[in-house]
C-alpha cells in the first residue's frame, strides 16, 4: 500500500487539519470547478466535500473526504490516516452536527451521526470491503475509527425549495423545525422502547440510538437558536418600524423565544448522558418543549404570515422594507 501522503484511488482519503491548507484548498477548488472530479492522487476516487462548523471557533471548515456508500447511506470515516487522535472535522460534528455536503455537482444539508456499537462494526466491515485501506488505518491506532453517517432527513423532501417572499421563507424554516422535532420524538420513543423490552439479568443493551438522538437534538436546537436570534435581532425590529401596531405581538414572540431557549437548555442537559437518562423525565421535557414550540410556531404564522407575504425574498437593498432578514 502506498504511504498516506501519496494516496491512490484504492487508498481511502481523509485529509485533516494536519494536511497543508494550500493542498486542501487546491483539492477543494478543483472539485468545485469540475463538478466533483479531481486529478492527481485522488483521480478516480470517491470524494466529497464536508463543511463543518468549528466546535470552538464557530467558523466554517471544508474538508475533502473519501466516502463509501452502503445502500442509501453515505459514510465517511474519521481515520486521520491511523493517527492516535480523531480528525478535527469529527470533533466539529460532535459539537455541531448540521453539516453541508458537496457530492459531484450536488450540494445539500445533512446531519452527521456517528454509528454506535454493533451498527458501527457492521458498517465498518462494509467500508473495509469497499476500501481495504481503512483496515490498515485501524491497525495503526488503538482508538476505534468513527464511522459517520451523513443523513439527509427524509422530511426535507416535503419542504418547498423555492421561496418568493418572507412568508414562504418562514414556512420553509418552520417545516424543517417541525419535521426535525418529529424525528427526535420518534427516535426517542424507539430508544426507550428498546431499553424497556430488555429482559433477564444481563446487562441492558447499549443505547444504540443514544448518539443519534443527541446529534439530531443538537442540530435542531442550533437551528432553532439561529432562527430565533435572527428574528429578534433583524426581522422583528425592522418590522416593528413599519408596523408599530404589532409591537405587542413582537414582545410576546420574543418572550416565547426566551422560554423555548430555557427548555432547550434543560433538554440539552438530559442529552449529556441519554444512556442513563430517566425515560419519564426525558419524555416530559421533550413533550413540554414540543407543545410550547408548536404553539409558538402556530402563533407566529397566524400573526406574521399575512404581512411577510408582502415582503420579497431574497430581501431587497438595505434601507428598504425588504432589508430585514429571517
Image (cartoon, rainbow, N blue to C red):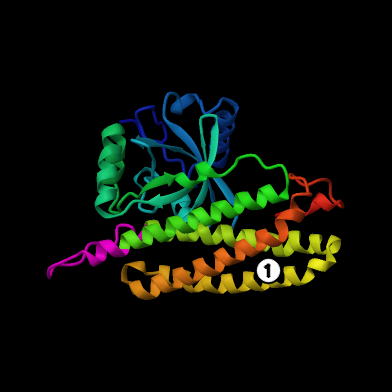
Residue at 35% x, 50% y: name it. 146
Q: Is residue 23 above or below residue 242?
A: above
Q: Is residue 213 above or below residue 259?
A: above
Name the side, left or right, on which 101 lies relative to 296: left
Q: Quadrant of residue 223?
A: bottom right
Residue at 81% x, 64% y: name it. 240
Q: State the residue position of label 1.
A: 253
Q: Residues within 10 Å of mark 1 (few under 14, many from 20)?
A: many
Determine if residue 91 is in view.
yes
Say whether residue 186 is magenta: no
Q: Residue 234, percent across and down?
A: 75, 60
Q: Residue 312, percent across and down?
A: 77, 45
The quarter of the picture where the C terminus appears is: bottom right
> In terms of secondary structure, what is the magenta stretch mainly?
loop
Name the side, left or right, on which 209 lies relative to 153: left
Residue 205 versus residue 20: which sits nearer the camera?
205
Q: Quadrant of residue 270?
A: bottom left
| Bounds of the magenta segment | 192-211
Determine if residue 54 is in view.
no
The quarter of the picture where the N terminus appears is: top left
Residue at 58% x, 31% y: name it. 32
Residue 183 versus residue 71: which sits nearer the camera?
183
Q: Residue 21, percent across and down?
A: 56, 42
Amino acid at each position: 500500500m502506498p504511504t498516506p501522503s501519496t494516496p491512490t484511488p484504492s487508498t481511502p482519503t481523509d485529509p485533516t487539519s494536519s494536511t497543508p491548507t494550500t493542498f486542501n484548498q487546491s483539492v477543494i477548488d478543483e472539485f468545485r470547478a469540475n463538478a466533483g472530479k479531481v486529478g492527481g492522487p485522488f483521480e478516480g476516487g470517491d470524494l466529497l466535500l464536508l463543511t463543518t462548523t468549528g466546535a470552538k471557533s464557530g467558523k466554517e471548515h471544508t474538508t475533502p473526504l473519501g466516502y463509501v456508500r452502503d445502500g442509501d447511506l453515505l459514510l465517511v470515516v474519521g481515520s486521520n490516516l491511523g493517527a492516535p487522535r480523531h480528525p478535527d472535522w469529527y470533533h466539529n460534528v460532535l459539537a455541531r452536527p448540521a453539516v453541508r455536503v458537496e457530492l459531484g455537482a450536488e450540494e445539500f444539508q445533512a446531519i452527521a451521526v456517528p454509528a454506535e456499537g454493533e451498527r458501527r462494526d457492521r458498517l465498518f466491515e462494509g467500508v473495509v470491503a469497499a476500501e481495504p485501506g481503512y483496515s490498515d488505518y485501524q491497525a495503526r491506532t488503538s482508538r476505534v475509527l468513527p464511522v459517520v453517517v451523513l443523513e439527509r432527513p427524509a422530511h426535507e423532501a416535503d419542504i418547498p425549495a423555492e421561496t418568493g417572499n418572507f412568508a414562504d421563507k418562514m414556512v420553509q424554516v418552520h417545516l424543517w423545525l417541525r419535521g426535525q422535532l418529529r424525528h427526535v420524538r420518534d427516535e426517542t420513543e424507539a430508544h426507550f422502547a428498546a431499553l424497556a423490552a430488555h429482559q433477564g439479568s444481563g446487562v441492558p443493551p447499549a443505547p444504540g440510538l443514544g448518539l443519534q438522538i443527541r446529534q439530531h437534538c443538537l442540530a435542531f436546537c442550533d437551528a432553532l437558536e439561529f432562527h430565533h436570534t435572527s428574528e429578534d435581532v433583524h426581522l422583528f425590529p425592522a418590522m416593528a418600524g413599519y408596523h408599530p401596531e404589532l409591537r405587542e405581538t413582537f414582545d410576546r414572540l420574543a418572550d416565547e423565544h426566551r422560554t423555548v431557549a430555557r427548555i432547550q437548555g434543560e433538554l440539552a442537559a438530559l442529552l449529556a448522558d441519554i444512556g442513563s437518562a430517566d425515560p419519564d423525565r426525558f419524555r416530559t421535557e421533550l413533550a413540554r418543549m414540543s407543545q410550547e414550540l408548536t404553539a409558538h410556531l402556530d402563533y407566529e404564522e397566524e400573526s406574521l404570515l399575512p404581512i411577510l407575504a408582502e415582503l420579497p425574498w431574497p430581501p431587497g437593498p438595505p434601507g428598504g422594507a425588504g432589508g430585514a432578514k429571517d
